[in-house]
Image (tube, helix red, strand yellow):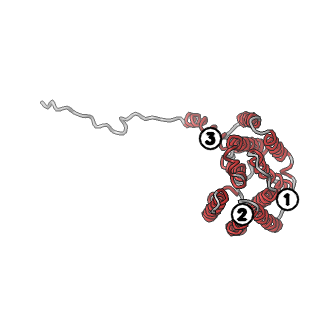
Amino acid sequence: MNHALEVPNPTSSDLPVVSVDPAVAVQALKPLARVTGLFVLLRPRQWVKGGLVLAAPLVAAPGAAVTHIVPLLGTLLSFLAAASAVYVFNDLRDRERDRVHPVKRNRPLASGRVSTTAAVILLVALLAGTAALTTLLPALTGVVVAGYLALNLWYCLALKHQPLVDVSVVSIGFVLRVLAGTIAVGAAVHPALLIGVYCACLALSLGKRRHELAALSAAGGEAGEHRPSLRAYSVHFLDQVVVVNLVAALIGYVAFVWTQTPPYGPITAGLTFPFAAFAVHRYLQMIAIGGSGGDPVEDLVRDRALLVNLGLWAAVLAQAMLASAWPVR
């Protein structure tokens, strides 16, 4: 008699079958999808634009920027909250229109990942946060932040449909960032810098309109159905005004740097002008030949040539500031 222990050999039919109800799986993923959707609704990739709040003080008055770091960071956070509030409000207003756009239909509200109620709650929280932050800032800085918020909400309601006014309002928003950062540290306001920033941002906004017009036309759609102001634009017209504004931005940049970091301002302007000119030429090449321009922030972070140019440009400016702070005797 064989008393050897027999070990059963399980087959696939012996194993328990675990089935997952697709409806249950989807329900389990919904909370995570909502949180992710709410975060995307804030447009975190656009927060890099807030860097203009820091840029002007760091270049024009680095000492003041260090001694006023708390109000400067408070100003930055105020603009980030205000800008995100504007994005949420805009997406709430345009969710139906976005659903027929080839790209914007993937936005959280247009795609249904975020409910209207959740977006409204987020908007109220952002507006309350912005108001709370501005009470901690210098009075005039708070006024600038409030002006930015009011102007951009008006933009979402009506101004975005007015040709040329739409891109002008967007550009003024960037100027207000620079102005608020300058005021927050108590530094002098430089008109040449404000003009340069306005013209550069106007060129980028016009380039974005050009990209939208070309993309929607190529897809066989009517551009004006998505953005009514596009009816008043043409690719040829936008090409011309983009160049005009980029040239004006270069002049504003040179005029600003020329008066900074004495006595090295003129030298710094001369040394950094090739980097500024390369950025202009590269951007024009990207929108005219490469079909870019739809998202200037994405264009910047993805283009190696622009990133290397920006790094070298910043290094030369930093050297000029150091030389000004500790001049060679």
Q: Residues within 10 Å of mark 3 (few under 14, many from 20)?
A: some
Say which quadrant the C terminus sits in: bottom right
Mark 1 to mark 2: distance in Å?
50 Å
* Residue 240, image x, y percentages: 81, 68
Label 2 vs label 3: CA separation? 51 Å
Residue 50 image point, x, y percent: 70, 48
Near-viewer residue (292 or 139)? 139
- Name the residue carrying label 3: 36
- Left or right: 328 as drawn, with respect to 251: left
Residue 189 position, x and y percent, is: 80, 52
Residue on which disc 1 sits: 231
* Above or below 282: residue 197: above
Look at the numbered disc 1 and give the secondary structure of its residue: helix
The numbered mark, 3 or 1, whose residue comes first in the sequence reads 3
Q: Amino acid at mark 2?
A: Pro
Q: Of the residues tagged 2 and 3, which is closer to the observer?
A: 2
